[in-house]
């Protein structure tokens, strides 16, 4: 019974466990960054990826004439590890900021602060993980940061990496939340448990998220 309970606990805490990982971020893994998770529904991104999402049905995105991308956060604040050092975490948020600005600048001028007529993008990285393929994690760090690996001979096996995000979109004039999204994605595969995860391992995921956010905005504008 204890082993079954432990397995269930690990499945809830880790984003990258083989056999119990979901395509969607499970409610027990929500970080608390967003104000209201009860309104989220399972949906698909413009590229077909599974997301938990809510969009205010009354929102008129044509009233937004510019966009302000807030600096992305690591939420909750994690403790770096040898596997996922602070430089990796900082690099991920820095690249996420740039990816979001690059994409949204294709549709709207970038604003320097929230204001009436400004769409505010408030992003967070809520999980970063590295886990040995087909094996269980040995280290779980407060709900949103998982660094999993095996320090035995099994360490030569490839390792999966994953990242999760939560983002809110607000009316810069009223501060009202007009959309929310929660999703996760797979990063670059690591060769073994001794390889340190780099920020570059998450770039393709971050680019994909930013691109999907822009496409969603454009689809709403074209309705």
Image (cartoon, rainbow, N blue to C red):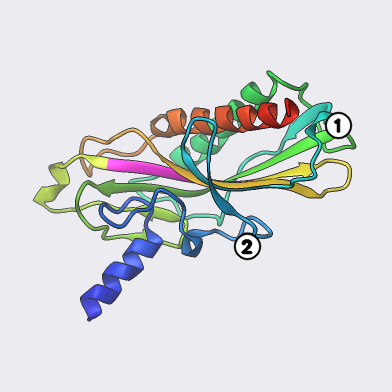
Secondary element type, mark 1: helix
Residue located 29% across and 42% down the image: 160
Instruction: Locate residue 135: give its quadrant.
Output: bottom left
Q: Residue furthest left?
A: 153
Nearer the N terminus, badge 2 or badge 1? 2
Residue under circle 1?
63
- Give the x, y percent position of residue 107: 72, 21
Residue neighbourhood size for the residue with mark 2, other residues' Cα within 10 Å, grouped as few (<14), some (14–19), many (≥20): few
Camera-side residue: 126 or 55?
Answer: 55
Q: Residue furthest top?
A: 106
- Give the x, y percent position of residue 117: 87, 33
- Give the x, y percent position of residue 204: 44, 28
Residue under circle 2?
38
Residue located 18% across and 53% down the image: 151
In-image side of 193 versus 85 (left or right): left
In-image side of 56 versus 197 (left or right): right
- Residues drawn in magenta: 160-167
Please say if 60 is above or below 33.
Answer: above
């Amino acid at each position: 019974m204890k082993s079954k309970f432990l397995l269930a606990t690990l499945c809830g805490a880790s984003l990258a466990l083989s056999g119990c990982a979901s395509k969607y971020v499970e409610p027990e893994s929500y970080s608390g960054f967003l104000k209201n998770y009860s309104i989220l529904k399972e949906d698909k991104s413009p590229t077909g990826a599974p997301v938990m999402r809510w969009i205010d049905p009354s929102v008129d995105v044509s009233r937004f004439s510019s966009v302000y991308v807030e600096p992305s956060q690591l939420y909750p604040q994690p403790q770096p590890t040898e596997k996922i050092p602070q430089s990796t975490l900082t690099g991920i948020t820095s690249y996420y900021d740039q990816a979001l600005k690059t994409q949204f600048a294709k549709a709207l001028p970038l604003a320097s602060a929230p204001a009436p007529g400004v769409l505010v993008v408030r992003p967070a990285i809520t999980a970063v993980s590295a886990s040995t393929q087909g094996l269980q994690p040995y280290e779980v760090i407060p709900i949103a940061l998982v660094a999993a690996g095996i320090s035995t001979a099994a360490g030569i096996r490839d390792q999966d990496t994953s990242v999760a995000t939560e983002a809110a979109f607000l009316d810069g004039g009223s501060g009202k939340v007009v959309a929310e999204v929660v999703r996760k994605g797979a990063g670059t595969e690591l060769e073994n448990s001794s390889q340190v995860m780099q920020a570059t391992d998450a770039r393709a995921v971050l680019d994909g998220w930013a691109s999907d956010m822009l496409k969603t905005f454009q689809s709403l504008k074209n309705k």
